[in-house]
Amino acid sequence: MSAETLRANGQESILPISITDHILNEQRHHPEATGALTSIMLGLARVARRISKTAREAESSGAYGLTGEINVQGEKVIKLDKQANDLFKEVMSKDPHVAGFASEEETTFVPFKPDPKRKYVLWFDPLDGSSNFDTSVTIGSIFSIYQRVSSVEESVNEADFLQKGREQVGAGYFVFGFDTKLVYTTGNGVFNFNLDSSGEFVLSKELPQIVTPEESMYYSVNEAYSPQWFPHVVAFVEMLKTMPEKPCSARYAGSLVTDFHRNLLKGGVYLYLSDKKHPEGKLRLNCELNPLAFIAEQAGGRATNGEMDILDIQPTSLHQRSPVVIGSKNEVNAFLKSK
Ligand code: AHG
Ligand code: MN
Ligand code: MN
């Protein structure tokens, strides 16, 4: 966002622009706004501050290691997965606007105390990239906000959590690396915040608004699966490596949020497709792909499952997986043409 735009939005200030200032300003354009999104975002920021601190002090806080449980995805749960999930649950259950949530770490959705004022539901991947945590590789948390479709007089039901990604009213992620970032959208561009030393998320001065390059400089894929890839995927990845003008370089951290964030900033395409061993890919539509697809589109990129835009898929089950190609528009379009 240029200085002129910030000024036009009444946002130029010698004081840092906090997440609260930013959302309140965004809501000036929505007279119907009730303050719900502000409250939800502040709750999310509070949880992220806590995860960031726990992760940073993992050795002394006992956050390393496994809980011994296997989650609904069939994956080993690490202690920080559970701690992050419990933090989101506790903080969101106290938010007067949130009617319930669903999470990668919960078998089914979790209803909160019925109350007609609770009009929103949330989806979380409380900790993404958990298998990287004990090696100090960047991890993150992903969130997605919907208005409930069930009657506010009743408890939430499954349909509230099976909405198309296109229905999201907000989405974003936190990145826990050597610093902590918040990237979010409410459908009016993608904004970029840093956690400062006072514990406040403040709008980045360097890059307040993220617009992703149209062309990829990088591709991210787990190339170890190439023996199982279908021929069109092999050919597409080969094409990325051999583009005459500017062949792509490879980056794959193995934390989706980390790979996605890097590609968003630098220009890149991330692939996790179906192959002979992963018939639906691996990534979860509701808690991972929809929020990142919303961010990608709002930043000028694109996300597809190979047949349709991720945001247009009608989810049919809570933990369904989907193939994905997400990132810079030109390469996502090229993938669709190559099929
Ligand atoms: P999570 O830590 O939330 O379970 O997600 C792990 C995901 C994603 O972050 C990552 O990109 C992907 O798994 C890596 O899978 P592979 O090891 O199969 O490449
Ligand atoms: Mn994940
Ligand atoms: Mn996770």
Image (cartoon, rainbow, N blue to C red):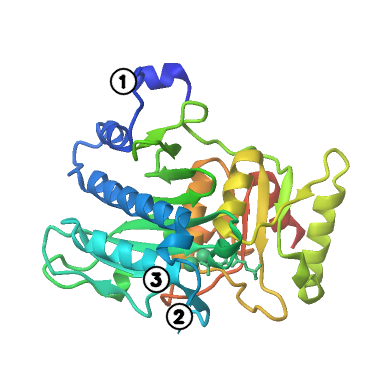
Tell me which label, 2 or 1, sits earlier in the chain: 1
Disc 2 target residue: 71
Q: In this view, does 44 lie to the left or right of 315?
A: left
Look at mark 3 in the image and give the residue it sits on.
Answer: 82
Give coordinates of residue 154: x percent, y percent. 14, 72
Q: Which of 23 and 152 is in front in this view?
A: 23
Residue 278 sits in quarter:
bottom right
Instruction: Give the label on residue 10, or none.
Output: 1
Amino acid type at image mark 2: Asn
Q: Residue at x 45, y 18 (%)?
A: 3
Local SS, label 1:
loop
Could you tell me the amino acid type at mark 3?
Lys
**Lower position in the chain sequence, tag 3 or tag 2:** 2
Real-space CA distance between mark 3 and mark 2, rounded to the nearest whole angstrom: 10 Å
Give x and y (percent) for residue 133.
Answer: 55, 62
Residue 312 visible: no
Eyeballing the image, is 2 above or below 259? above
Q: Which disc, if any, is residue 44?
A: none
Mark 2 nearby-residue class (10 Å; few <14, some 14–19, many ≥20):
some
CA gap, disc 2 and disc 1: 46 Å
**Mark 2 or 1, which is nearer the eye?**
2
